[in-house]
Image (spheres, coloured by chain):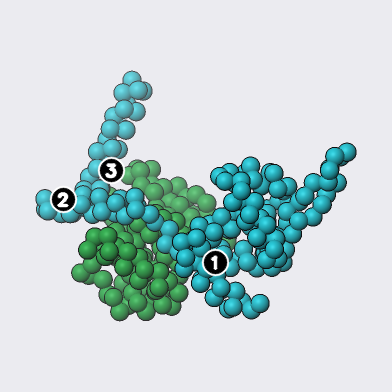
Chain colours: A cyan, B green
Amino acid sequence: MGHTELLYILFSFLGTKRGLWMFGSEMQLLELCSKKQLGIREILSILGGSRTSKLRLIKELERSGSLELTQCPNGRGRPKKIVTLSPLGIMMLENLQSINDMMIKMNENDMLTVLEQLRLRNKIIDSGIDPYERFIEMNEIALNIRNSAESSASI
Amino acid sequence: MKSQDPIQLKKELEEADFQVSFFTEGNPCFVLTNLETATEIEVWVKPDGITLDVECLRRRREVKISRTADYGFWIIGPEDFIVNKLARRDRRSQDEVDVLSVLENEKSRLDSRYLQTIAERAGVFPLLKALQKKAKQRWG
């Protein structure tokens, strides 16, 4: 599968609500498997949330060739199944990370923060004060408080 | 400060009463602290997404860190600041908050043609448009 083709599939997939949810979970799972070799139980406990949906995602990624399940001897009991990233999985993770980099990171609360900052700034300007001048003035006041506190402590 | 030599530059800054931190070769950024005014300045040697060319330098602005300071610091213009913030490799939501604040605060003074040119050059123009659209939808 070519690079462009893979990106096209990812973008079409992201166009759906389920796609966006899957995108986050998928990236989280692939990132986890790229860092260290973990068993299925360990992965489910680290990821948290619905075990059924996470298990389904592991199976889906194994079916698509992104994850590989290998058996590893585990003392006297049953061999442990270790989940590792395949070369295709590494490529997929790199693409998902680059798509994630393109996305807007701010949320509704951040938008409200900007709005509040603008309101305060406009309030200062409407009072005929330059916001940067006010910042320097406030800094000087804070410095004076610090200096007087330090000198009274030394007396 | 006129020195191009990093070691000499560090020495000059320290002589001018600045505490210099994270000043290592290869580090794109170092921090200056002026203890007298309690001001911290992040200096980016290799800023992401922008080129420190003639046009960028022409649009720089001088700011003073205190009312009594007899020297100033040059900061990049708002258009370059916007692109730099969006092109950061480790861009966080705070960078986008800063971008929206500048877009709104400098609304009437921004050179939109220059902004588009440098945003396209840095590959962040679609992101900039998406942010502007989001802000417009939210605030009208």
List the single residue furthest toward the left: A127
Q: Which residue is mark 3?
A: A139
The percent coordinates of residue B92 (x first, y second) are: 44, 56
Contact? badges 3 and 2 (CB < 8 Å): no
Which quadrant of the view contains residue A118?
Answer: bottom left
Label 1 packing within 10 angstroms: few (<14), some (14-19), many (20+): few
Which quadrant of the view contains residue B128?
Answer: bottom left
Q: Are marks 1 and 3 on the same chain?
A: yes
Residues at marks 1 and 2, CA–CA distance in whole angstroms:
40 Å
The percent coordinates of residue A33 (x first, y second) are: 68, 54
Which callout, 1 or 2, points to the residue nearer the camera?
1
Q: Which quadrant of the figure contains the C terminus of chain A? A: top left
Q: Is residue A9 above or below residue A76?
A: below
Q: Tell me: A141 left or right of A100.
A: left
Q: Is residue B68 above or below residue A27?
A: above
Label 2 packing within 10 angstroms: few (<14), some (14-19), many (20+): few
Between residue B102 and residue B129, name the one nearer to us.
B129
Label 3 packing within 10 angstroms: few (<14), some (14-19), many (20+): some
Residue at x 36%, y 23% (from the top left corner): A154
List the single residue furthest toward the right: A76
Q: Which residue is mark 2?
A: A123
Q: Which residue is mark 1?
A: A98
The percent coordinates of residue B41 (x first, y second) are: 39, 53
The percent coordinates of residue B107 (x first, y second) are: 23, 67
Q: Amino acid at mark 3?
A: Asn
Element under label 2?
A: helix
